Image (cartoon, rainbow, N blue to C red):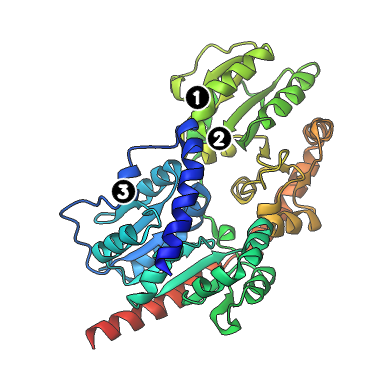
Amino acid sequence: MSIIYDLIFFVVVIIYLPIYLFKKKFHRGFFLRLGRLPKNLALDRPIWIHAVSVGEVMAVRGLVEELRKIFPNKRLVISTVTSTGNKIARRMAGEGDFITYLPLDFSFIVRNVIDRINPSVFIIVETELWPNLISYLYQKNIPVIVVNGRISDSSFRGYLAIRFLIKPILNKITMFCVQSNRDAQRLICLGVSGNKINITGNMKFDVVVYKIESSILAGYRQSLGLSFSDRLFVCGSTHPQEEKAILEVYKALQKNLSNLKLIIAPRHPERTVQVEKLIIQYNFTPLRISRLSPTPHTPHPTPVFILDTVGQLINYYAIADIVFVGGSLVKRGGHNILEPASLDKPVIFGAHMFNFRDIAELFLINNAAISVRNTEELKIKIIYLLQNPSRITELTLRAKELILTNQGATRRNLEFIKEEVNKKDDGDQG
């Protein structure tokens, strides 16, 4: 079967190569995807965690910390696909950990990489299926565990269409720890045995937002030149066309809310130049946060700040008065609303939250967040919140309660991982 998967993957690479070249997706870590690992790499049966991008890496922060406590002598390998995810993973890395990129799914590449790393267990975050990788891990009797597993609507439709190819791969996975009953039922429809599936919840509810000292928060506000009366609207993880909608709303709001300031944090910081040009079209002055002095600067009358770095969004959520979470006014599926919610911020998102459907529905049912369908509704809701601080208090209290109620997935997943690692290590020693 590896020949078939090699051929399929080769066709996929040929199709997507022009897109990658056009979008400048190639980076220095690409050689790692070709299996070019350091010559002196010696990891001694590590725990390998694969998290494709920023969201998945952030979701396993707590899991990584707990694994270090339980297995102090184990080194960790964390692989990603995106460079932004890789940057976050490097900040999480401990001494002796190896941060890398997932090898391209050609059989000759994955065999070399797996033989070199030789993990005691391979953990996949949120169900990424790489046939040759999973097949060779299975062949080497290395347990494969999916944590925070989910099957999106689009993935489910695609998997059903090629169920005859997907089913054998899914059944080589040792265990699935999934977010919801919907995900469990979809796996069963795809041919996975029910005794391999555990509903453990969503680890993103376990996100730990460390309390930031008020003096540090004041420093962030000062660096933006904000006065005591200024209100800050932070739009996180935005996508093309979404920034245009946000700027239209902001321009309309400026007529009556001149003290409202705006930060746009593009999902992909490499789009900063594009966002700058758009801001200028709306007669605002774009200011990159990476270029601001840490000391207070002279306020500009019409600034729009751009968060053009990775890993700092949480700090600016912490000083926001209102947060909009992007990828949701356009059909991208939305992004994680739990981080700003855990910081006691009122959260607004658009109608397209299909990648976070369960979380979004839970928040809306419990009156803990606000959903908008278009720019007019976004404008109305911002005005309403700014004029009704009691509504902000209500939203944030309900959100905090929801997060606390739904925590525990990390601990539950950890128990299954611990069992598999111990079982594997005992078997190897025997």
Q: Which residue in the structure is indicated by mark 3?
A: 32
Q: Residue at x 25, y 50 (%)?
A: 36
Q: Which residue in the structure is indicated by mark 2?
A: 316
Q: Looking at the image, can residue 340 be seen? A: yes
Q: Are marks 1 and 2 in contact (CB under 8 Å)?
A: yes
**Residue 293 x/y as whole percent:** 44, 19
**Residue type at mark 2?**
Tyr
In-image side of 235 versus 366 (left or right): left
Residue 4 image-quadrant placement: bottom left
2 or 3: tag closer to the N-terminus: 3
**Residue type at mark 1?**
Ile
Up the image or down, 96 lies above or below 1; here it is above
**Is disc 2 placed on a helix, strand or loop?**
helix
Closer to the camera, 34 or 233? 34
The residue sitting at the left extreme is 40
Q: Looking at the image, can residue 212 be seen? A: no
Q: Which mark is residue 143?
A: none
Residue 358 image-quadrant placement: bottom right
Q: Are marks 2 and 3 in contact (CB under 8 Å)?
A: no
**Residue 386 x/y as whole percent:** 77, 32
Q: Nearer the viewer, mark 1 or mark 2?
A: 1
Looking at the figure, which quarter contains the C terminus? bottom left
* C-alpha separation, residue under disc 2 versus residue under disc 3: 33 Å
